[in-house]
Image (tube, rainbow, N blue to C red):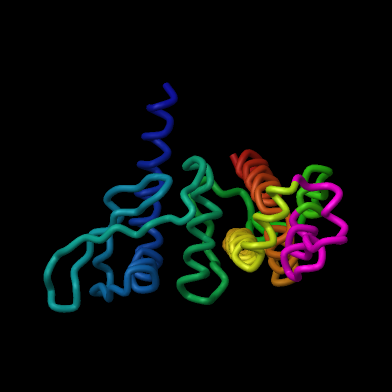
Amino acid sequence: MAGQNVSAMKARIMSHMNADHEDSLQDYLRFYNKISATPASAKLVDFDVDFMKIEYVDINGSPSSSIVKIEPPMSSLAESRTRLIAMAEEATGQPFHHQPPGSTHSTSDVAADSSLRWSPPDIVGIVTATGISFGLLAFAWSYPFSQGGPLEAILPQFLLEFCREFRPQLFAGLLTIQVAEGAFVAWKAFHHRASIGDTILWGLNGFLEGGPAIRRLNNLLGQKGKKSQ
């Protein structure tokens, strides 16, 4: 029965998009795949949580097809309503003024419901942020690992010598990892309609916390996905 329900939902979405939102299909092709289709020629022929397959006629009159990726993938087809609206708005730069299949909310309600808010770190995130901040500060200059420094009485001798010898490389490696994690968290938050301020806060959390911030963000997105079903 679950498989039948998914198939029926997929068929309903495809039918609705082809009947009422062919213009959006052309917008997806143009914006995401840099393809110009002949007007009224785009047709959604396959669809899943991570892609749309759209057939179209190009400007030379030749039939073709293209895969538009859905990134990040949806957790289920129940997210289609908000995701397709978000993609249409991104593709056109304009608010989406139509209601997809099965929608009982206005477009403004959907936009409000789909926005992502910043969440402060939990105890694990605070501990991780403290450790990473200390590590960055300790590797930033030589004193903490030097003779008479604060870490001499805490760390074993072999580890002290290792940190003294490779301190610049350790600092560069840790900084690179944290910048990458911060950028990833900020991108993911912004992609899920976080405001600029919330996106910056998520990015800072990703930079300082790393894994706990990613876990917290994924949990929030999972809860939003369940509410939309």
Tell me where residue 170 appears, x and y as whole percent: 63, 61
- The question of residue 143 being in magenta is answered with yes
Q: Quadrant of the C terminus?
A: top right
Q: Quadrant of the N terminus?
A: top left
Q: Which residue occupies the foreground of this view, 20 or 137?
A: 137
**Residue at the image position 29 percent from the left and 54 percent from the top:** 53
Direction from residue 102 to residue 209 in the image, left or right: right
Position of residue 67 relative to residue 229, above or below, is: below
Residue 184 sits in quarter: bottom right
Report the magenta residues as a range: 132-156
How many discs appear? 0
Q: Which residue occupies the foreground of this view, 184 or 91?
A: 184
Residue 130 sits in quarter: bottom right
- The question of residue 183 being in magenta is answered with no
Direction from residue 119 to residue 96 in the image, left or right: left
Tell me where residue 116 appears, x and y as whole percent: 69, 57
Residue 150 sits in quarter: bottom right
**Residue at the image position 82 percent from the left and 50 percent from the top:** 126
**Residue at the image position 38 percent from the left and 57 percent from the top:** 69
Q: Which residue occupies the foreground of this view, 71 or 185?
A: 185
Direction from residue 112 to residue 46 in the image, left or right: left
Tell me where residue 94 appears, x and y as whole percent: 54, 75
Direction from residue 227 to residue 146 in the image, left or right: right
Tell me where residue 9 appears, x and y as whole percent: 42, 39
